[in-house]
Image (cartoon, grey):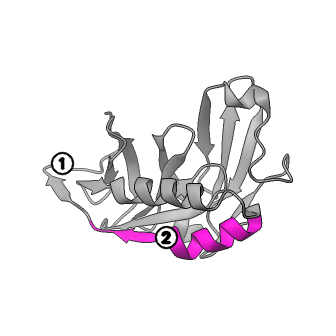
Amino acid sequence: LGKSEGYQVVHPEHDDLDHRDEEDNHNTFFISACRNGNAKLWNLHGKCVRSYYLSSTKPNGIESLAIVERGSTFVCGHVDGTARLWEAWSGICIGEFKGHDRIVSAICSLNDQQHILTGAHDETIKLWDVSTAMQALSSFIENQQSRSPIARNLLAESALHQEYVCTRSFTGHSGAVLALAC
């Protein structure tokens, strides 16, 4: 199974990380997460398609999440003030956003699928550019099709994981930012 800096993805229903049954290819998916680090990718028929354990310790518990690119990536906000970008089918962490001083309690993906907003208990909102991650992921997938899923996961951990710098900060709230909508 894929591992990345203490994070582990668990796929109890699937032996092959790239397997997507025909029914799932045509459905809409959503992601749910718990503070304990468990996250699940669901289809609207009630089937859990993927299960993830995204945090190995309590301080990194999940507080918020958003889909960045439908069927491809999602981002989780954590208790430690970071947010992490994940590839949805393999569960590989492909990016980390450091810049908040407190819990990341709100995340929103802009319609351009190139930027995300994070809001936190530090009373700030931050804008992040994820376009390089999307380009790197697309290129990586195209070049790795012939490799086994486990080999792809190991290569992806080193090839894709990036640390991002905030593009812009927004201040002015007099309390924790608990919700964002795009």
Residue 57 visible, this orientation: no
* Residue 113 sits in quarter: top left
* Mark 2 crowd level (few <14, some 14–19, many ≥20, 10 Å Cα): many
Q: Mark 1 points at which residue?
A: 173
Q: Name the residue under label 2.
A: 161
Report whether 43 appears left or right of 133.
right
* View extreme (left): residue: 172
Element class at badge 1: loop
Q: Is the magenta stretch mostly helix, strand or loop?
A: helix
Question: Where residue 57 sits: x, y (%)?
Answer: 62, 72
Q: Which residue is drawn at 69% across and 30% down?
A: 25
Considering only order in the chain, which callout, 2 or 1, is on the residue closer to the N terminus? Answer: 2
Q: Residue at x 25, y 55 (%)?
A: 126
Foreground pick, 56 / 69: 69
What segment is highlighted magenta in the picture?
Answer: 150-165
Residue type of the residue flagged with mark 1: His
Residue 127 visible, this orientation: yes
Report whether 104 appears left or right of 122.
right
* Mark 1 crowd level (few <14, some 14–19, many ≥20, 10 Å Cα): few
Foreground pick, 20 / 13: 20
Say which quadrant the C terminus sits in: top left
Question: Where residue 81 sits: x, y (%)?
Answer: 39, 65
Nearest-to-viewer mark from 1 and 2: 2
Foreground pick, 27 / 127: 27
Does the magenta portion include 144? no
Residue type of the residue flagged with mark 2: His
Q: How far apart are marks 1 and 2 (CA)?
A: 32 Å
On screen, residue 79 above or below 50:
below
